[in-house]
Amino acid sequence: MIAEEPTHSLSEFVWRERPRQQERTSEFCLTDPHFGRLPSTPSGSFTVNSPSFASISAQIFEAITQITSIAKITLSAQLREKVSRLAQLPENWDGEGARQIKWHILANVVGTLIRLRQGPHQFHEPFVAPTFDGFIQLDWHGDKRSLEVQATDSGWEAVGTSVGADNARQYYTAEFDRNEFGQIKKLYQWFLGDELIWPFL
């Protein structure tokens, strides 16, 4: 059963339930606490009926699909298709007990990528993969540096790898809250080479 999530910072998938005496409805919207609604997002939430878990699942997938179409100006068709496929993964999608993707995490990831894409720096779309416990990992790989950022219960975990002139590899790690977009931005700039030193040293 999907829990009634609190409002999440950065990119939020808001769930609001009306009194049980009334017809049960859910409202979804993609927002950002620092900049308001993300660019091109409609000003109003859209409302859907949700009398059962099965219909809730279908409606949340529809909401994710609408979010990815909102992002079509900034995210490629391949990445939008990947997000849609992640939203449709069922429980036990790997046959070994993997959890269904948490929808508020998926919306958070979409919002993060939109903000990175709209920055002044060069944007490389990451490889996006589901994790066993229902979260998402973003991977960027270059000739000299790589960056892996994974959503967790408490926020984000990051691992960076750099290759020196002697071909020796150095590894770095970081953890930070989900609403700290500035930290992801610094890590991404490090991956591009704009930041020479790992931001969390």
Image: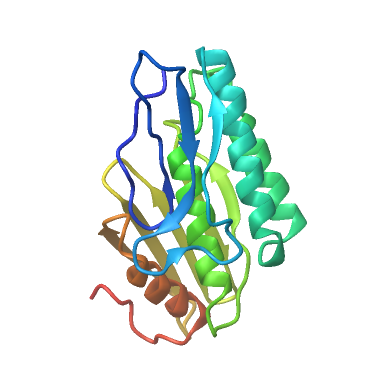
Provide residue 4's location: percent of width, then percent of height: 34, 28
Relative depth, front residue between 157 and 177: 177
Task: From the viewer's perspective, tell me whether residue 31 is left or right of residue 125.
Answer: left
The answer to whether residue 63 of the structure is visible from this angle is: yes
Q: Within the image, what quadrant is residue 197 found in?
A: bottom left
Provide residue 23's location: percent of width, then percent of height: 46, 17
In the rendered image, the vertical position of residue 81 relative to residue 75, given as above or below: above
Say which residue appears at 50% left-offset and 68% top-offset.
Answer: 115
Query: Coloured how?
Result: rainbow
Q: Quadrant of the N terminus?
A: top left
Relative depth, front residue between 172 and 57: 57
Relative depth, front residue between 197 and 23: 23
Total labels drawn? 0
In the rendered image, the vertical position of residue 20 relative to residue 138, given as above or below: above
Provide residue 28's location: percent of width, then percent of height: 49, 40
Q: Within the image, what quadrant is residue 142 found in?
A: bottom right
In the rendered image, the vertical position of residue 36 relative to residue 156, given as above or below: below
Task: From the viewer's perspective, tell me whether residue 18 is left or right of residue 27.
Answer: left
* Residue furthest to the right: 77
Q: Quadrant of the C terminus?
A: bottom left
* Residue furthest to the left: 201
Say which residue appears at 45% left-offset and 79% top-offset.
Answer: 189
Say which residue appears at 65% left-offset and 45% top-offset.
Answer: 66
Relative depth, front residue between 45 and 110: 45
In the rendered image, the vertical position of residue 94 relative to residue 27, given as above or below: above
The answer to whether residue 93 of the structure is visible from this angle is: no
Provide residue 86's location: percent of width, then percent of height: 61, 37
